[in-house]
Amino acid sequence: MNLKEIQTLIKFISTSKVDEVAIEQKDFKIKIRRNANVSTRTVTVAAPQSHVEESAPSAPESAPTSPAAKEVASNTEEIKSPMIGTFYRKASPDKPSFVEVGDVVEKGQVICIIEAMKLFNEIESEVSGRIVKVLIDDSQPVEYDQPLFLVEPV
């Protein structure tokens, strides 16, 4: 199993509801575990003579630059992308957006879709509150842990 296949497997785990996958081959063993309460993933690769352990790096948080942005950021929470892919605000071009600025969302409510590897993944809100700002334009690529929405908790 090469690095690209391992990365694809990690992306699959992050988009599915599976918490753990273990694969064993003749001289190769990999176990990928996802903890719902922690946003890091641990990958352990063991061969007959070697042992490698990696943790997925977390993206640094970007600091607001203007005073107005600092005020907004102090009482808001970011909803971040759980994966790399293409961000969509609507289920299809002829449907309305899942959420608009000013809408109140509940924890677990679908707020957008991210397409990754030809799969459309519904992204649910991690917090309850009012949408203050949509940070990504429709049909734009997003990175793992990139802020998508600013939400003011209610």
Image (spheres, rainbow, N blue to C red):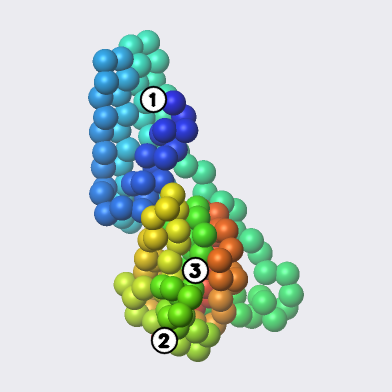
Q: Disc 2 to disc 1, how far (Cα)?
A: 45 Å
Query: Secondary structure beneath disc 1?
Result: loop
Q: CA distance from mark 3 to mark 1?
A: 32 Å
Q: Position of residue 49 (x, y in %)?
A: 37, 10
Looking at the picture, tell me which residue is in the foreground, 20 or 70.
20
**Crowdedness near tag 1: few (<14), some (14–19) or many (≥20) residues, C-alpha within 10 Å:** few
Amino acid under disc 2: Val
Residue located at (36% from left, 30% from top)? 44
Crowding around mark 3 (Cα neighbors within 10 Å: few <14, some 14 to 19, many 20+) is many
Q: Nearer the viewer, residue 73 or 136?
A: 136
- Looking at marks 2 and 1 on the same chain, the residue that comes earlier in the sequence is marked by 1
Mark 2 vs mark 1: give the one in front.
1
Tag 3 near tag 1, CB within 8 Å: no
Q: Describe the element under mark 3 as helix, strand or loop.
A: strand
User: Dot 2, crowdedness within 10 Å: few (<14), some or many (≥20)?
Assistant: some
Image quadrant in which you'd find residue 61: bottom right
**Quadrant containing the N terminus in the rendered view:** top left
The tally of labels here is 3
Q: Earlier along the polypeptide chain: callout 3 or callout 1?
A: 1
Q: What residue would you read off at disc 3?
A: 88
Element type at mark 2: strand
Where does label 1 land, which residue? 1
Asked if residue 128 shows in the view, the reply is yes
Q: Residue at x 67, y 77 (%)?
A: 69
Residue in front for this viewpoint, 87 or 51: 87
The furthest residue to the right: 66
Task: Name which residue type carries label 3.
Answer: Tyr
Q: Which residue is pictured at 59% across the width and 53% down the height?
A: 60
Residue named by callout 2: 104
